[in-house]
Amino acid sequence: MGRRAAIRLLFAAALLVAANFGGYAFAYFARTRGASPLFGGAADTTALAPAYFTYLQDLWSRSPALAVTGRGSFFTVLADAAVASLGLLAIALVLSVLLGLTLGLLGVRRNPPGVRGWITAGAIVGLSAPSFFIGRLAVVALLFLVIYTPWGNQPLPLQGFGWDLHLVLPVTALVIRPTAQIAQVTAGLLAGELSRQYIVAARGKGVPERRIVAHHALRNVWAPLTHAIAGTVRLLVSDAIVVEWLFAWPGLGFLMAATLVPAEFASASVASSFMDPPLVASLLTVFAAIFVLTDMLAGALARLADPRQREA
């Protein structure tokens, strides 16, 4: 067990190093290659390896030379963005899990066992609707209310940061697809579990249906359900890049999207950080760390929930 854990940690460390170096190299070559139509003759002649090692030295020494133009020190910007993103993702994940589990439990047909048609249709619609479409739809609906309703005021802020009503639109855009995925997986797993022989035997003994679901069927599907929830975290992180940009939420996704905006198109609200190698490398490392930690946590919880997955 200790050997396997050490191998997993080494693999996770190698993945983070690869994400960091790959992100730096991609942004570096995008900015310095003479063939780049955006940079042309302004290509940097510095070799990649010395530039990357200088970046690592700056990270180690917390050098003030690493800075995002006009937005403060590099580490301050990254820390503030991480707090904003992790808070938004945590709220969206909690709501997605609660709503998904509730809909999944309601969507199970218990006699005979199966998945109700409405949850299949709802999951298809939810999984087919990208987050940016849901976000735009929410904005259009809000503007429609402002224009065509008698009171005419704006009930929700369209953009900006705040742990208040500013959360409503970005959270709404984020939770639809994860909720649909969790609901579909929950209903499917429970429908299969409720058809097993031990469930039939429990019903024959007169065990209440609620107890059968909560203490028998649901307990046996926690392990695969945990992995499904971990998959929704990856979905949330990928969607957060578009959602944060759409609603001007100053998180990691917003910073990542800002690296795709050339300097000539930057504005006062979007700092000029187009393909900044240190920023791209650090952001990709943070995203990779979130994925790695999520998978490791999901694996640990799955082994706790299912003794069959525990190693001898």
Image (cartoon, rainbow, N blue to C red):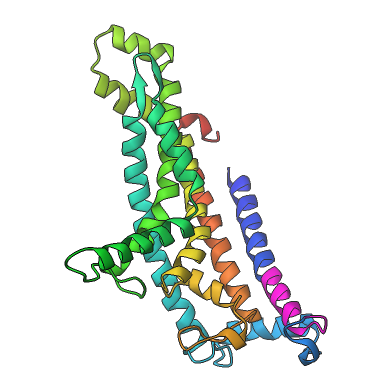
Magenta-drawn stretch contains 142: no
Percent x, y of residue 161? 34, 74
Q: Which residues are magenta?
A: 21-36
Residue under the point 81% across and 85% down: 47
Q: Quadrant location of the N terminus?
A: top right
In the image shown, does 86 or 261 lie closer to the viewer? 261
Residue 220 can be seen in this image: no
Percent x, y of residue 112? 38, 13
* Count of all numbered marks drawn on residues in the image: 0
Residue under the point 48% across and 41% down: 228
Percent x, y of residue 286? 54, 67
For this orientation, the residue located farthest to the top is 204
Percent x, y of residue 219? 37, 30
Magenta stretch, overall SS: helix
In the image shown, does 82 or 30 lie closer to the viewer? 30
Residue under the point 50% across and 42% down: 227
Which corner quadrant of the image does residue 86 belong to?
bottom left
Q: Is residue 156 above or below residue 185?
A: below
Q: Is residue 135 above or below residue 280?
A: above
Specify whether 211 is left or right of 225.
Answer: left
Q: Quadrant location of the C terminus?
A: top right
Q: Is residue 247 above or below residue 61?
A: above
Specify whether 172 is left or right of 149.
Answer: right
In the image shown, does 82 or 3 lie closer to the viewer? 82
